[in-house]
Amino acid sequence: MRAVVLHGDRHVAVDEVPDARLPGPDGAVVRVERTAICGSDLHLYHGLQGAPGVHLGHEFAGVVEEVGAETHRVRKGDRVLVSGVIGCGRCTACMGRDPVLCRNGGPKVFGTNTALDGGQAEAVSVPAADAFALPIPDGISVEQAVLLTDILPTGYLGAQRADIRPGSTVAVIGLGPVGVFALQCAQLYGPSRIFAVDRVADRLARAEALGAEPVDATEVSAARRILELTGGRGVDAVIEAVGTDATIKDAIFAAAPGGTVSVIGVNMNFEFPFPLPLALMRRLTFRVTLASVPSTWEALVPLVASGRLQPEEVFTHRLGLSEAVEGYRVFDARTDGVLKVLLDPSR
Ligand SMILES: NC(=O)c1ccc[n+]([C@@H]2O[C@H](COP(=O)([O-])OP(=O)(O)OC[C@H]3O[C@@H](n4cnc5c(N)ncnc54)[C@H](O)[C@@H]3O)[C@@H](O)[C@H]2O)c1
Ligand SMILES: [Zn+2]
Ligand SMILES: [Zn+2]
């Protein structure tokens, strides 16, 4: 079968690899109908994480082709979406839909190392399928299903964990697809103002169209501009959706006294220079979240099925899996009006 394989710095290829096989009696093989490229894949693409040989991708939905003897809830022929983050599937945390707290080895993300092959492929081996594969609910399209495997849940949890209340002021830093979803989920909580920060003009315009106040961070520091725009006070809630040291620091500096900083951007810096005195004097709450994807489905499925959220609007580019190299190039370059790239493994 074909899969997108990491070869090195800014080098991926669509390679012929061994077919996906049942990972064990609790697993399934899923034939992929649609899969997407994520900002998290770019960390591997840039050589900041992972190693050559990894089969990439953690956002996919498709048809169950085969199940193990101990897989009962999910059946052959079901159309499913699969959480990009999984755990053992058996511990109390996994049974409670919170694989990030898995007690048997912690969370695992598809397509980030060679132990769990990714979803940018014709088929995927899915362990613990009963716990982490969800039959696609009525009223949800396959494109919407792909967005329920990672980034809509991430944006939702970023907003939920930012303590936004009716009337709060909010800033969202980073307006990639994850930031766009954080912005839309922040709006579910009734804030009075949302500042939306990025450096790409079409992304700022999209946020403005969604009702946010754009802040172009190309020339000014986002934190300084947000302080100016709020009379020196800062915002009650900051959602960080980039993951660089600079933007996480900006998020902390933009928070008002008593405020909350909710980081969903991925940062792997063990030496992050946290400005503790500022957090102390302003009594800030700092949260960082790897998305426990299945925990959000109960809230998000009805919001999508009813049309209250229309996440598929983030897809600007729909390509065949055979065009994945170009998909990575354009998603990384942020040119051509790109926001999110969807891949179809039948092409
Ligand atoms: N926590 C989780 O579970 C989880 C899940 C999915 C993605 N993520 C992370 O979310 C982040 C965003 O993902 P995405 O798919 O939206 O990626 P993306 O690369 O499309 O978006 C990042 C955005 O940040 C902007 N940006 C970069 N530097 C900036 C700066 N200095 N100031 C302002 N804006 C800046 C970019 O222009 C871009 O629009 C990534 O770090 C990704 O790994 C986390
Ligand atoms: Zn992702
Ligand atoms: Zn577990």
Image (spheres, grey):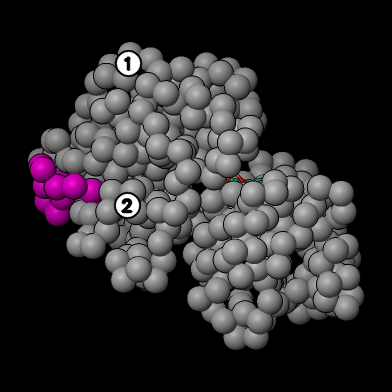
The numbered dot on residue 62 is: none
Mark 1 CB lies closer than 8 A to ligand 2 = no
Measuring 34% from the left and 41% from the top, which residue is drawn there? 60
| Quadrant of residue 138 within the rendered picture | bottom left
- For the stretch drawn in magenta, the main secondary structure is loop
The quarter of the rendered structure image containing the C terminus is top left
CB under 8 Å between callouts 2 and 1? no
Residue 204 located within the stretch drawn in magenta: no
Q: Residue furthest top?
A: 16
Is residue 154 depicted above or below 119 in this figure?
Answer: below
At horizontal 31% and vertical 39% (from top left) the residue drawn is 34
Q: Is residue 42 visible?
A: no
Q: Position of residue 260 (x, y in %)?
A: 69, 71
| Magenta region, residue range | 71-81
Q: 330 or 165, which lies in front?
A: 330
Residue linked to disc 1: 17
Along the line of sight, which residue is nearer the eye, 286 or 221?
221
Q: Look at the image and tell me in which quarter the N terminus lies.
A: top left
Circle 2 is placed at which residue position? Answer: 145
Disc 1: CA contacts within 10 A as few (<14), some (14-19) or many (>=20) = few
